[in-house]
Amino acid sequence: QVQLVESGGGLVQTGGSLRLSCAASGRTEYSYGVGWFRQAPGKERELVAAIIWNSGRTNYADSVKGRCTISRDNAKKTVDLQMNNLRPEDTAVYYCASRKTAFTSYNFWGQGTQVTVSS
C-alpha cells in the first residue's frame, strides 16, 4: 500500500500561482511514478502531469504545458506541482496518484485538494 496526502490547494485569482504537494508514504518502493490529476464538476478526470521517481521523466497535458512544472524529491518522497498563470478553467479538485509500473494504472490515490481560480 502507498498512502498519498495532497496539500497546497486554495483560492487564487486569474494569473496567480499555486504549488501543490503530494507526500507519499508506506510501501513507496512499489511506486514507479506519481501523477497529478484533476476533476472539475461535470467533467472527466484528466491527467495534468506525471513524473517517474527514478528517472525524473515528466509528461504534461497540453492544457498546462508551459504553465505547470512537476518535480519530485526522492529523499522526502514528495511530488510537487507548481502551477503558474492560473485560469478559471483550472478550477478543479486535484488528486495525486501512484502507479506500480509503467504498464499499470494508477491504483493509489490521495483524498484531493480543491483549487479555485476566480476571474
Image: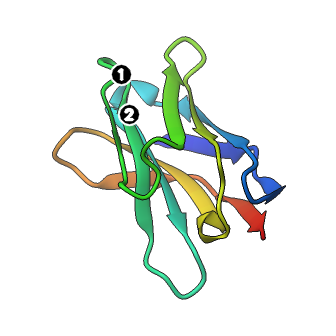
Q: Secondary structure at mark 2?
A: strand
Q: Return the x and y of residue 50 as percentages of the image width and height.
A: 39, 41
Hey, which residue is sitting farthest top in the picture? 75
In the picture, measured across the screen, residue 48 lies left or right of residue 117, that is left
Which sits earlier in the primary sequence, circle 1 or circle 2? Answer: 2
Image quadrant where residue 102 sits = top left
Q: Return the x and y of residue 76 as percentages of the image width and height.
A: 60, 17
Residue at the location (60% across, 83% down)? 41
Are there few (<14), some (14-19), or many (20+) residues within 10 Å of tag 1? Answer: some
Q: What amino acid is labelled 2 in the image? A: Ile
Q: Where residue 51 is drawn, which disc sits there?
A: 2
Of residues 23 and 42, the one drawn nearer to the viewer in this rendering: 42
Please give the residue where the numbered disc 1 appears in the rendered image: 56
Residue at the location (81% across, 55% down)? 10
Q: Return the x and y of residue 72 as percentages of the image width and height.
A: 50, 24
Residue at the location (35% across, 21% down)? 56
Q: Secondary structure at mark 1?
A: loop
How far apart marks 1 and 2 lie (CA) works out to: 6 Å
Of residues 39 and 14, the one drawn nearer to the viewer in this rendering: 14
Query: Image height check: is 83 above or below 39?
Result: above
Image quadrant where residue 39 sits = bottom right
Q: Is there a contact, CB below 8 Å, between mark 1 and mark 2?
A: yes
* Number of numbered tags placed on the structure image: 2
Are there few (<14), some (14-19), or many (20+) residues within 10 Å of tag 2? Answer: many
Query: Image height check: is 1 above or below 40?
Result: above
Q: Return the x and y of residue 12 as percentages of the image width and height.
A: 81, 56
Q: What amino acid is labelled 1 in the image? A: Gly
Residue at the location (51% across, 34% down)? 69
Image quadrant where residue 28 sits = top left
Hey, which residue is sitting farthest bottom in the picture? 42
In the picture, measured across the screen, residue 92 lies left or right of residue 70, that is right
Name the image quarter holding the C terminus. Answer: bottom right
